[in-house]
Each structure stands twice: as C-alpha cells, then as structure tokens.
Amino acid sequence: MRRTGVTLAVGAALIAAGILVASLRVNPYLYFAGYVILQYVVIATAWNILGGYAGYVNFGTPAFFALGAYTAVVLIQTVRAPLPVLIVAGGLVSALLGLGIGYLTLRLRGVFFSIATLALSIVLQTVIINWEFVGGSRGLSVIRPSGPPFGNYVTFLFTVMTGLAVVAVITARFIERSWIGRGLAALRDNEEAAECMGVPTLRLKLFATTISGFLLGVAGAPFPYYVTFVDPNSAFSLDYAVNALAMPMIGGTTSWVGPVIGAVLLNSAQQYASVTISSEWNLFIVGVVLVAFVVLAPEGILGLVRRLRRR
Amino acid sequence: MPDALLEVQGLTKRFGGFMALNGVSIAVKPGERFGLIGPNGSGKTTLINCVSGALPVDGGRILFDGREITGLPAHRRTRLGLVRSFQIPKPFGSMTVLENLDIPLEYAAHERSDAADADAMEILRAIGLESKAHLRPAGLTQIEMRKLELARAMAARPKLLISDEAMAGLSHAEVDDILAILFGLSERGITIIMIEHIMRAVMRFSERIVVLDTGEVIAEGTPDQIVRNPAVEKAYLGE
C-alpha cells in the first residue's frame, strides 16, 4: 500500500512538472514535439500490455488510435463535447474494439492474430474513408475551443498528454506487478499450461485487449485538437503500427520502463531527424534500429542493462 | 462422499470423420492408483484432453467429486482439484523454477503471493529440485524438466493428478525416481491416473488398469489380469 502511495506521489509530481514546463515560455515547437513523444509513451505502454505482457502482437494500433480520434471528431461535430469527455469516450469506444479482438484470440494465435489486427485496421480505415460526416477521404478541419484553462492550446494539450502518459504508465506498472501480470506472463509463455494451472486465460486476455484498446483510444482522442485537421491517412498512419511495436521492443517488453525508454529515445531521434535531415527518414530510423535490436539485443535496452550488470 | 472421484460416462469425441473416443466410460475411486494404457493412437491423450477440459466433448458426461464438469473450462477444473501434467513438459520459460510453481499456487490453490514462495520451496524440496529453484527451465535436464512438470501440478493442490507419460524417454534409474515421487503423492492421499508406455512402471504402480484401443475400453482389471488378457495382447501385438 505504501508503495502504491509512492507511485501515485511520483505520478502527481510528474504531472505538476508537466504543468510547470508548460508554463515556461520556451520555443513553442518543443511543446509540439513533446506532445508527440508523450503520445507515444501512452501508445507504446498500451501496446505493451497486450504485446509484451500477454504476448499477443497487435499490428492494428492505427485502428485503435484512429477510433479514439474519430470518436472525438464525432463528439466535436455533434455536441462540441469538452476535452475530458472526448478522452473518456474515445477510450471507451476503443476499449470495445479491444474486447472484440480479445474474442479473436479464442481462434487466432501468434502471427494469425497479428494479421487479423492488421486487416482490422484496413477495414476500419475503409469505413472512415466512406463516411462523409467525419470528412471521408478528404479529411476535416477541427476548430479548437477558444480559451484553454491555461497557456495556449498547445501547451494545454501538452499538459493533458503528460497526465495521460502518467496514468498509462501507472496502469501498466500496476498490472505488471499484480496477479494479473503474473497470469499474463504465464499465458504468454504457454497458454495451454497456464489454463491447466488454473489461470483463466480467456478472461485475462480480454482484460489485456480491453485495457490496451482503451489506452490507445485515449491517446488518439486529443489528436483532432492537436493537428486541427483529421484525415484517414494521418489518423491510420502506418507509423503508429510500427512505432507501437518498435518502441517496446527497443526498450524492453517485460517491464513498464521499457516502452517509456523506447518511446522517448526513438521518437526523439525521429523528430530530430525529420527536422535536421528530412521527414522521410522517420521510418527508416525505426527500421534500422529495430532490426539491430531484434538481432543483437532481443530483450531490448532493459535486457542489455541486465546483461551488463550480471557481468 | 461419492463412490468415484472421477466418473466418465459414455464419452464420445470425433475429429472430422475419425472417431477418437467411442462411448468411453471409466470410474476412478478416491485414493486409487489408476493406470491407463493402450497402443499409440488408441485415444489415451484425447481422453485426458477431454477430461482436463482442453478439448470439448461430442457426447457423454464427466463427473468429478460428485459434480458435473463436462462444460467447465480447464482452469475451473484445475481449481476443483483435477490437475494434469503434460507429456511434453510445458514450463513457463520466462520464469524461474520457483516462479513456475507460484502460478498454480496463486491461481489454483488461491494462496497469497507472499506465502506462495515458501510453499513452492517446500514442494521443490519434496521433489528434489530445491537446488534449481532460481534457474530458468531452459537450464534443466530432461528429468528435471519432468520433475518440474510434476512439481507444478502438485502446486495446484490436486485431488486427482493425471500424469501423462511423465517417464517417456527416461533411463531405468530415472523412471524409478519418478515412480518413487508418484508413490509418495499417492501415500499422501492423492488419486493418480498414470498414462504410460513403460509397462514395467504402469504394472508396478497401478492398482487397476484400463486398456483403450481405437477409442474404446477393451479391458479393465488388476495388472495381473491385464497381462493375461488375450484382447490386450491382440491390441498390442496383432493376431
């Protein structure tokens, strides 16, 4: 209980730090870039709950992210719902989709599950492209609400994303260290043996897909206000699928720290490259780094650190 | 107290057009050492998969400890005390030997996680694996892997343990080692179903044996009766 208290205190301190940083009047581009890094912390952490802890590799991250974003678009278009409502609603709708793919795990495992999630993303994108109300293939401009609670809207969103990242990481850490995390690890290692040792594998998988989906949707919900123009190509971007998987793999999938390290390092590198070299180098960097890690350090940076310590 | 701890009534299982189990009925009494034998492909493992809940059945009923469990998922059966081990060991590879035991202790026996480690250590001591407690399963030998499989099943606190070919591929001395462990469990009141190809082991261990062939029970009796049964001889050796 005391450790939970410490975790929450650290989380609160981080959010406070986020607000403090937001109130500094440094180069506005840094908030813009910082938002994306934090968004990837949420995405990588959410992906890892299913992919790292339970071992179900989800290639459909764009579907969940975009569903969160488009849920927000619908709510903005219809009732101009406030940001907290958008975030919760985006999370819930994506959580439902997560529950749905959870039932897929009954029949599909390993690479077949991954292919199904990729297909899901394409199907959903096609639906959105053909839905005029949310802009169809042309996309849609979104007008930010006037007068954020503090600062300008970008610094405000930066703070909000800090909070969401803290919530996501605390959730992942809690799952990892609880009986749920141990059960997920067992089913990742061997699903049949886990079930025969009393682990309710289906229920745990549904839990993991739902929570993972919820957090991915949460990450996507503020997206319309961040970019102010939402179109299927940006919301369903392949970047999300690749990064969501690469960041935990590079950081280390067995611990909540891994996705955080991976997201911060990889996305900083990507943003640095797109400013200094060209925006096309984004995925190239991810590709090279990912291949290097898969070959040389399959357990990510955390695995490397552990190996060095043992020596 | 019901007569039988496990009662299988008219169990049928088809794979497409292939009849893997055709109306199999067996009853295992509490505390019994029960042997299940049969040639390759006779349906032993299918029967165990149906009983443990890994496969759905096409017909018949399964009762355990006086209640029907035919439709229950496998993890619920384990929690009731119907526990199996696997023919090919399936350890949790990312965990240490000790942590492997913590899973059933926590999930099947519902122990608090802080108490589980001590109990897991006790089981490992009883089975002779305590020196390997902090190793990963990948660092174990074949026999140690089998022992881990049994130790993990023990940690689920079984009333009935189904041991699926725990001795296949082991040396003479190692078979005796595993047999001694199973006898020890039996003395502690655990009912055991042994599925085995090593006749020396089944004959010595079992009080009663059922023989399966092509999905049907063809013989049942004490080891002595089974050895002298002409139908069994025919199933194993042909005419």
Image (cartoon, coloured by chain):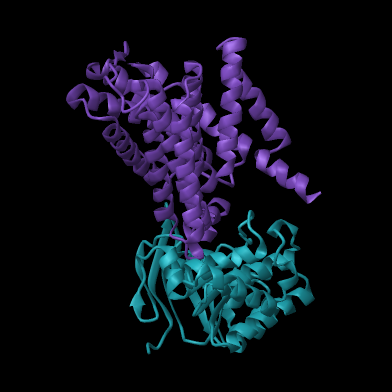
Q: Residue at the right extreme?
A: A311
Q: Colour of chain A?
A: purple
Residue A89 makes an appearance in the image? yes
Quarter of the image for residue B103 reads bottom right
Residue A23 screen position, x and y as percent: 44, 26
Residue A268 screen position, x and y as percent: 58, 24
| Up-down relation of residue A240 to residue B84 (above or below) | above
| Up-down relation of residue A172 to residue B98 (above or below) | above
| Up-down relation of residue B37 to residue A228 (above or below) | below
Residue A297 screen position, x and y as percent: 71, 37
Q: Residue at x 69, y 43 (%)?
A: A303
Residue A213 screen position, x and y as percent: 39, 39
Residue A246 makes an appearance in the image? no
Q: How many marks?
A: 0
Q: Residue at x 37, y 34 (%)?
A: A217
The residue lying toward the viewer, choosing from A154 and B52, is A154
Note the chain letter of the cyan one: B
Q: Report the side of B223 relative to A152 (left or right).
A: right
Quarter of the image for residue A142 reads top left
